[in-house]
Image (cartoon, coloured by chain):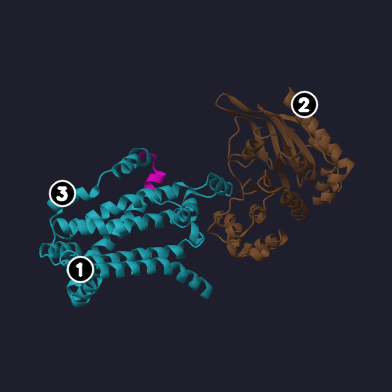
Amino acid sequence: MRAAALSEASLGPAARTTDDQPSSVLRIKAVRKLYRDLEAIRNVSFDVADGEFLSLLGPSGCGKSTLLMMVAGLIDSTEGEIAVNGKAVAGPRREVGVVFQQPVLLPWRKVLDNVLFPIELLKLPRSQYEKRAMDLLAMAKIEDFAHHLPRQLSGGMRQRVSICRALIHDPRILLMDEPFSALDALTRDEMGVELLRIWQANRKTVIFVTHSIREAVLLSDRVLVMGRRPSTIVEELAIDLPRPRHIGMTEDESFNRFVRTLRKAIEASHAS
Amino acid sequence: MPARLREYATELAWPVGISLAMLGMWELAVRELGIRSIILPPPSEIAEAIIARHDLLLTHLWPSLYLTVLGFALSVVGGVLVAVLITYSTIVRKGFYPVIIVSQVIPKISIAPLFIVWFGTGTMSGLLLAFLVAFFPMTINAAMGFQAVDEDIHRMARTFMGTRWQIFWKIRMPNALPYIFAGMKISITLAIIGVIVSEFVASQEGIGYLIKLAGGLLDTPLMMAAITVLSISGLALYGMIAALEGRAVYWQSPNDIGGAAGG
């Protein structure tokens, strides 16, 4: 099942969108968002396949975060339909894990207790998830800090903890809202590669919001470019670079071709 | 640990040293200038008075401390409860909270004689005045703490389907703790003032009564002995709260404690 979904994911968007389920984990159809009279998002539709790494790329304030928060069930859409596993999103749900721009850790909880926080909120038995939490921390290479307080950690380490927290209850979809934008450039590249490693081990569906073209190309199977307000999808690009990916690829001509294509798409949307 | 102790010791050395130097100068000045002890007794004479009349001092200290601690405890419980109401009830927040903040301007001590009229000269007046003055900073600090939860933390908890109850106990409450302790440190000193003022106005016991009595008898050494004992007690109460804070608010480094809400 899983292998089938994967090989399909590598076929690119065209093959997927014609196919009707069950590989589509998330379906967004004709979504529109109004803030009073202001149209923030106009007619956005796309499907996301199981295990796919999808990036939403666009300038700041283009509504990509709003779209992500609608998928998370934190914001209602004005029109259109958002469905996870075929069920319409009416509020936050268990199948979704969210990583925010800031790590948003609770300062009074040790790292391990921060990771287990969703388990408490979801009233799941903590003892059954402690090992998983430690495994996740080990995968993020911060298991030595399990009993430290967040303030004893660097910014990059804190964001790793928040990724572990988003994965603890084994959600199918991981939503990431510019998770590395608060980090310095070097840490950022490193975190991107780390994220790919974690993703490859867990095979989650990831929707990754970013304004970095490089980051989108390096991480994604597919990139959707969103234009300025009222925001809609102006370009869709499948990134068929081989996996596993590494930082060295950013030097390759094939990588830069994708970067140029996306940049042109963004510039074109500005001009109009 | 020893390194930390040494750090504390060096930090204490300066204020303690300067205090001792000032006491020495006081002692010397009084003796050299021949100031009568009815005007200003030297520290040695105050110390003598404390030792010689410790029975009398303690007899009057206990009721004052008892009322202070009780009034303070009531203000903490009441303040936190009202803060919860402010946090969760729109009517209380929009209607009462501004009133509470504005009423801060009223010098509540001035109500003391009125309390005597209403509740008599017994312990009730002192207790209520202590509660009244300590209650407001407690409420305002706790309300700030409950509401100062980062919007991102709120959103994070909602994505994991946290209930209101969970959000209160697991997020708002710990978030408010530093603010509550900042409020407690203000409230305990105010509670002492409330009790003493009430005893000044009308009372047959308590350290405030003793200060007034000694003043009437022109027994300045006794008066200053009472003030000293009261100050030491206040310092001890404050110290106990600060020590408790260090344990309860373990996630803040010592440097930013109190930075949360000083007033």
- Separation (CA) of disc 2 from disc 1: 87 Å
Pointer 1 local density, CA inside 10 Å: few below 14, some 14–19, many at least 20: many
Subunit ID for the residue under disc 1: B
State whether residue A243 is above or below residue B95: below
Q: Looking at the image, do the residues carrying marks 2 and 1 touch, with CB atoms under 8 Å apart?
A: no
Give whichever of A136, B15 is nearer the camera. Answer: B15
B32 in the magenta segment: no
| Residue B189 image offset from top left, x and y in percent | 31, 58
Which of the 4 quarters of the picture holds residue A258? Answer: top right
| Residue named by callout 3 | B114
What separation in Å lies between label 3 and label 1 (alpha carbons)? Answer: 35 Å
Dominant secondary structure of the magenta stretch? helix
Q: Earlier in the sequence, mark 3 or mark 1?
A: 1
Q: Which residue is mark 1?
A: B41
Tell me which segment is drawn in magenta.
B84-91
The C terminus of chain A lies in which quarter of the figure?
top right
For the residues carrying marks 3 and 1, which lies nearer the camera in this image? 1
Q: Is residue B57 left or right of residue A58?
A: left
Chain ID of residue with mark 3:
B
Front residue of this view, candidates A238 and A105: A105
Q: Colour of chain B?
A: cyan
- Tags 2 and 1 both on a single chain: no
Residue beneath the point at 64% across and 47% down: A98
How many numbered discs sit on the rendered protein?
Answer: 3
Left or right of B245, for residue B39? left
The residue at the far right in this view is A253
What secondary structure is found at the residue carrying circle 3?
A: helix
Residue at which label 2 appears: A268
- Based on the displayed image, in which of its 4 quarters is residue A33 positioned? top right
Question: Can residue B107 be seen?
Answer: yes
- Residue positioned 83% across, 39% down in the render: A12
Q: Secondary structure at mark 2?
A: helix
